[in-house]
Image: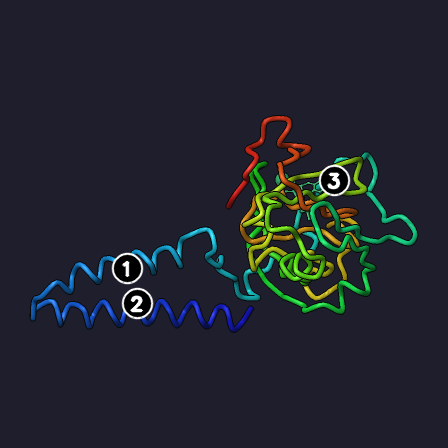
């Protein structure tokens, strides 16, 4: 993500610089103000629109591993079944089953962002995994699939997302946390992790990812939590 962050910082710097230049030129007059307004609107959309990148945090912001809460709905800690694989299907050209090894061979992304749980806590970790966007390309996700559903082996916990958030650059299928393999308390072997969703949207203990034409609700969503669950 380093180059993304650099790019974003650069854009902010360019925007600030241009505003200064614009003030100087405003003295000269002409319809410049109007075109500056249009240009600003485009920059705003890039910085604050749905495709924007969320801020990433420095290593010093990291919550110590044992202070990062752990949630699962099962009575006991869910452990992956022997021979665990991830099934990716639904509206895709090539339904595919991925082993953990195959996921780890894809482009690895590292991102340190804040986790927001609606129960009233937040915490920070660094997450390691593959962008869902890369998987969508690999399986040939149908452009008409506007939704993506995540299922787990934790007593049927699931969630469904809008496609744009699912294919956001900061939405990962994470197999690592703070430099280690993901542990059972945080969703091993693979979980969803995203900078753009609240905690309950980030399904742990993944078994399936399905591209769908309609949303399929979710464990908490069907009990009244907001479906979109954006940060
Ligand atoms: N399979 C599964 N995924 C889940 C949950 C769960 O109970 N089961 N809880 C959700 C909620 S409410 C939160 S805040 C986060 C917690 O992630 P953590 O246990 O790594 O802190 O996982 C989410 N994903
Ligand atoms: Mo949560």
Neighbours of disc 3 within 10 Å: few (<14), some (14-19), many (20+): some
- Residue under label 2, please give it: 15
The verdict on label 2 being within 8 Å of ligand 1 is no
Label ID, residue 40: 1
- Residue under label 3, please give it: 72
The residues bearing labels 1 and 3 have C-alpha atoms spaced at a distance of 44 Å
The verdict on label 3 being within 8 Å of ligand 1 is yes
The residues bearing labels 2 and 1 have C-alpha atoms spaced at a distance of 8 Å
Q: Is residue 71 left or right of residue 11?
A: right
Q: Is residue 18 left or right of residue 74?
A: left
Q: Nearer the viewer, mark 2 or mark 1?
A: 1
Where 44 sits versus 101, above or below?
Answer: above
Looking at the picture, tell me which residue is in the foreground, 42 or 14: 42
Q: Dots 1 and 3: beta carbons under 8 Å?
A: no
Q: Nearer the viewer, mark 3 or mark 2?
A: 2
| Image coords of residue 70 (percent x, y) | 70, 45
Q: Dots 2 and 1: beta carbons under 8 Å?
A: yes
Looking at the picture, tell me which residue is in the foreground, 204 or 217: 217
Neighbours of disc 1 within 10 Å: few (<14), some (14-19), many (20+): some
């Amino acid at each position: 993500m380093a180059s993304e962050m650099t790019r974003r910082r650069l854009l902010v710097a360019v925007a600030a610089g241009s505003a200064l230049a614009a003030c100087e030129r405003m003295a000269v007059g002409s319809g410049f103000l109007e075109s500056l307004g249009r240009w600003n609107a485009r920059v705003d959309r890039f910085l604050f629109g749905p495709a924007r990148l969320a801020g990433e945090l420095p290593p010093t912001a990291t919550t110590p591993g044992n202070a990062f809460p752990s949630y699962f709905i099962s009575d006991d800690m869910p452990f992956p079944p022997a021979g665990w694989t991830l099934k990716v299907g639904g509206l895709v050209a090539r339904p595919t089953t991925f082993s953990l090894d195959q996921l780890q061979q894809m482009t690895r992304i590292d991102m340190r962002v804040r986790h927001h749980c609606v129960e009233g806590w937040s915490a920070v970790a660094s997450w390691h995994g593959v962008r869902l966007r890369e998987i969508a390309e690999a399986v040939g996700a149908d452009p008409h699939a506007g939704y993506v559903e995540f299922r787990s082996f934790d007593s049927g916990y699931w969630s469904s997302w809008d496609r744009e958030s699912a294919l956001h650059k900061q939405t990962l299928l994470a197999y690592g946390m703070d430099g280690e393999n993901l542990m059972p308390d945080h969703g091993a072997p693979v979980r969803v992790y995203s900078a753009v969703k609240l905690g309950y949207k980030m399904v742990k203990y993944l078994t399936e990812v399905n591209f769908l034409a309609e949303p399929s609700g979710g464990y908490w969503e069907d009990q009244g939590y907001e479906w979109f669950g954006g940060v």
